[in-house]
Image (cartoon, rainbow, N blue to C red):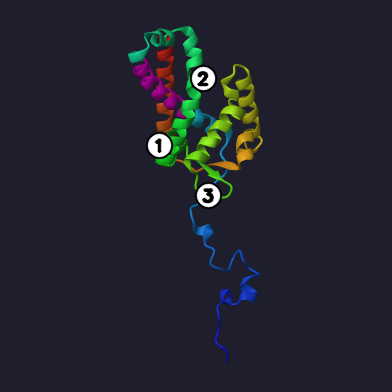
Amino acid sequence: MAAWSEIKGIPELSSTMPGIIGTDDRLDQDNDESYPLAGRWKRSFGRVFDTSIEISFLAFWLEILFERYSFGWIEWLFTAVSNQFFPLLCLPLTFILDAIIYRVFGNTPGKFLLGLTVEHVTSVPLTFLHYLKRNFYLWFSGFALGLPLVNFYRMFFQLIRLGEKKQTTYDEELEFRVRAKPIGWLRVAVFIVLFGYISSWHSLYRAM
């Protein structure tokens, strides 16, 4: 009597059932592809949170730097015009800093707290240049370089796409996906407290 053989050891049979038989155990892994695409509000609040922190960090050090070499810079910084244009001038540096933070820590603070992850459709690990390229595409396609009125139109357009379960134009072109992992109430509470603190700090800073 012939000995019994496992089905996966018979090529003719195992090839007919690739989803059940074989050595592919990806379904048992906790990979990001098992999570849904992130919605527009999580993505928006995560981006605002990160950008606010990064602009504050840059503003602090730029003030110290220019205070030593240009008193006129300090005078301009506390004018009404600077309140509108200084964040726009910081955006390119902010996106570079954002990519550095992602590369060093594996995620940015806002995305971490909200359970968001950025991935490429090929599942290749994202490098600093990958993330930086995405940020600058966001700057052009999402923020419209910060140009007044135009930037609001572009941001609203991207929000509509996300609301329709589509990807943003820059993520679609670069083949990136943003997924949302489930998070507990503690992360949500921490995010709300920090977001409120950052918003209050920015309001006080502009009123100075």
Residue type (three-letter) at the residue carrying disc 1: Leu
Residue 46: give its label.
none
Would residue 41 be seen by someone viewing this image from the given angle? no
**Pair 2/1: label in front:** 2
Going from N to C along the chain, the mark reached first, 2 or 1, is: 2
Q: Is residue 118 visible?
A: yes
Cα–Cα span, label 3 and label 2:
32 Å
> Does the magenta portion include 104?
no
Residue receiving disc 1: 186
Task: Say if the magenta span includes residue 63.
Answer: yes
Q: Is residue 50 above or below residue 174?
A: above
Q: Residue at x 48, y 7 (%)?
A: 80
Q: Earlier in the sequence, mark 3 or mark 1?
A: 3
Q: Position of residue 202 (x, y in %)?
A: 43, 18
The residue indicated by pointer 3 is 124
Residue 156: quadrant of the picture? top right
Where, by quadrant of the figure, is residue 173 drawn?
Answer: top right
197 versus 74 height, above or below: below
- For the point 53% across and 59% down, the residue is 26
Question: On the rendered image, what quadrant is the N terminus found in?
Answer: bottom right
Marks 3 and 1 sit apart, C-alpha to C-alpha, by 31 Å
Closer to the eye: label 3 or 1: 3
* Number of other residues with Cα within 10 Å of mark 3, as a class: few under 14, some 14 to 19, many 20 or more: few
Dot label at residue 88: 2
What residue span does the magenta drawing correspond to?
49-66
